[in-house]
Amino acid sequence: MSPKTILLRSVLFLGLSAVPLSAQPASLATFQAEAARAKSSLTLPVYPLTPAEVKAQAEDAIKAADLAFDALAAQDKSKLTFANTFGAADAIAAKVVDVSLVLGTVAESSTDKAMRDMANDMGVKLQEWAVALDYREPLYRTLKAYADTKPALDHEQQRLVDDQMRSYRRAGLSLPPAEKAEAEKLRKELAAVNTEFAVNINEARAPLDFTAAELAGLPQSFLDSPGVRQPDGHYRVMANITWHTQAVMENAENPDVRKRVLTARFNLAREKNTAVLTKLVILRADIAHKLGYASWDDYQIEVRMAKTGAAARKFEEQLVAGLQPKYDAELETLRQLKAAQTGKADAKLEAWDISYYTNKLKREKYAVDAEKLRVYFPYQATLEGMFAIYQKIFSLKFTAVTPPYVWAPGVQLYVVADATSGVPMGAFYLDMFPRDGKFNHFACFAQKSGGVMADGRYDLPVAALLCNFPAPSATKPSLLKHSDVETLFHEFGHVMHAMLSRSRYVEQGGFNVPQDFVEAPSQMLENWVWDKAVLDTFAADYRDPSKKIPAEAIASLVAARQATEGYGERRQLSIGLLDLTLHGLSPDEARKTDVVQLTNDITGRVAFPPPAGTFWAAYIGHLAGYDAGYYGYLWAKVMAIDMASVFKASPGGFLDAKVGRRLRDEVYGVGNTRDVGESVEVFLGRPRSMQPFLEYVGIKSDAAKK
């Protein structure tokens, strides 16, 4: 019921059997019948065909929910039960959530701009409705009347009641009428401005044309990629496409070219989003103050594992300090590489040099050539290999089915079933390659929530991956970098989280866990791609599949990662501390703060000074939706690597199905029906530890203790 839900925006070898994705898709109806026999419902979202249908879906969902909530609120107070109050409210809100999820996907991925625009407009309307839901006095009074009876409830029911009543407190329901109305007004305005910030990012473009000579050092695979070569013989780099930027920053020999691309990347959406971010920071500070909090970070983090903004900042600053010696040593190594290449002993490292010399270091010292390793990771075989691994460790089976109409051509659909019983557990879509107007990065988008329906059947979850991997060319398949493979395992980890979560109530399932934990189940699965036994199940030269990725290449990848991880983690920390600093401001401080200067100051202190005249926070989409939450990536990563260490130490290693089943049951399955910290420690069988994380980044135990 809480608006937080609506505002959410994952060969045969060693016993692994790959899914033949090229096989004829199965019938969806077969799985729907099987789900029905198991007292479940496998119902796919309905994707609109026209802007009018987008509008109708949103308005119909709101109308139906309004009627249902009015009926709930009007009940005889002497006949209230959990089922007709909090249970019913969870189910009513879930229907609106599902429409919001569908339209959010349309907004980020439709091929029709009119569809995207209407979906964004309706997204604002749905978010405003979600905010207003917190202020419906009759509904609040009815729910409070039942809660005040102190009924005897089971653990999950009591947790739902407590969380909802806390949401009412956090919305300001106890405020005087005028202040409450002002808080509601500001929160609705915030929802609209959040959408504006995200839309500006999605629409930002930065085409830069270069000659072949200027792009010396870039692999031929990039130059041959669709849309790169222009009719006039130039080559177009789209700085808004992540892998385009990465290719240039890692490989372009000309520093001026790297500087141009990085500067363009760091100025994406600047013209529009500088003012928008300023407005967001002020609005959030004002809302927090009106609701009785010192700052927005305290308001947001209250319901997360960290509990306070101060605790989150302390965690981040401790990591900054702990990584300082390693970070300094890494940058000096890169500077020396530049000095050697340029012949200038006093060469100064610039922001546009870091990726280039990091790549050079990996190639020359650790024999890691990201481009040469691509041949071992053709997209299709990598996807099938990943499927086989996840099927084994989680005891699942994925089957391709023919999808009804979705948001774009080429989107694929799979049903997930339990491998033992054959009972369907959910479905997921894959939308994996770039196109104009599509979401620019990599993410899992929930499409439909899972939960028990009024008739007792379980409504199965649906998720979607929206990614931007290099598209296949006329002569080559899509070939992934090792880092792309890591991204794929991560994002599909979110899909697994969505599919395996089993809670009675929507508000306690799927991604509805504390935001500083939500990345942990997928970050954990990144560890799989650094393991020889795992990679041997699918990583083979696409030109000769008998040639597996060499053991020394994997060892070099690990050594190179540890040699360069300090900067990578400090960059993450710079975003997290920027986010926390922006949202740790009082209303007065927010109005006096220059968000551009603050961004560049923190980036320079924690990571590296950005190019002059740039403002990269304008393109950090997490600042609208993950606000005061970015610290959660590292907060969760520490737990994720700790959890992965259980697999690493097990008899079957990262392919151990027994440990996988425990993870499925104790972490993914229970969702937010209990404290996630407890779930992690039940899985671990011990208290949490930071030691595996320190080893992962290459900090020795003795050094970590100093």
Image: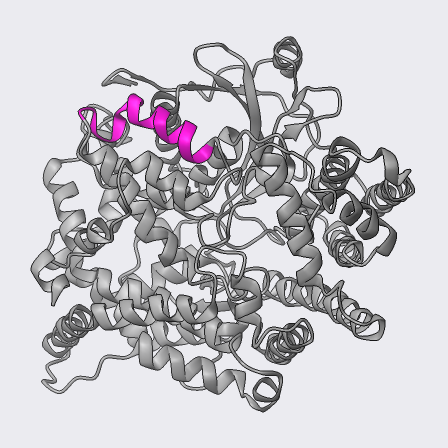
Query: Which range is magenta?
Result: 651-668
Nearest the eye: 691 or 559 = 691
Nearest the eye: 318 or 352 = 318
Task: Please say if 514 is above or below 542.
Answer: below
Residue 579 on image: x %, y % = 48, 71
Residue 359 on image: x %, y % = 22, 60
Name the dominant secondary structure of the magenta segment.
helix
Task: Please say if 8 is above or below 94.
Answer: below
Considering every residue shown, the one lying at the far bottom of the view is: 592
320 vs 454, left or right, is left
Quadrant of the image for the N terminus? top right
Whether residue 138 appears in magenta in the rendering, the answer is: no
Whether residue 654 appears in magenta in the rendering, the answer is: yes
76 vs 385, left or right, is right
How many numbered circles does the render carry? 0
Residue 506 on image: x %, y % = 64, 37
Nearest the eye: 336 or 582 = 582
567 vs 365, left or right, is right
**Residue 590 image-quadrant placement:** bottom right
Please name the colour scheme applied to the rendered image. one colour
Residue 294 on image: x %, y % = 57, 77
Residue 209 visible from this viewpoint? yes
**Residue 244 image-quadrant placement:** bottom left
Residue 411 visible from this viewpoint? no
User: Which residue is at a point 38% across and 52% down the rendered structure image?
Assistant: 636
Quadrant of the image for the C terminus? bottom left
**Residue 303 image-quadrant placement:** bottom right
Nearest the eye: 202 or 192 = 192
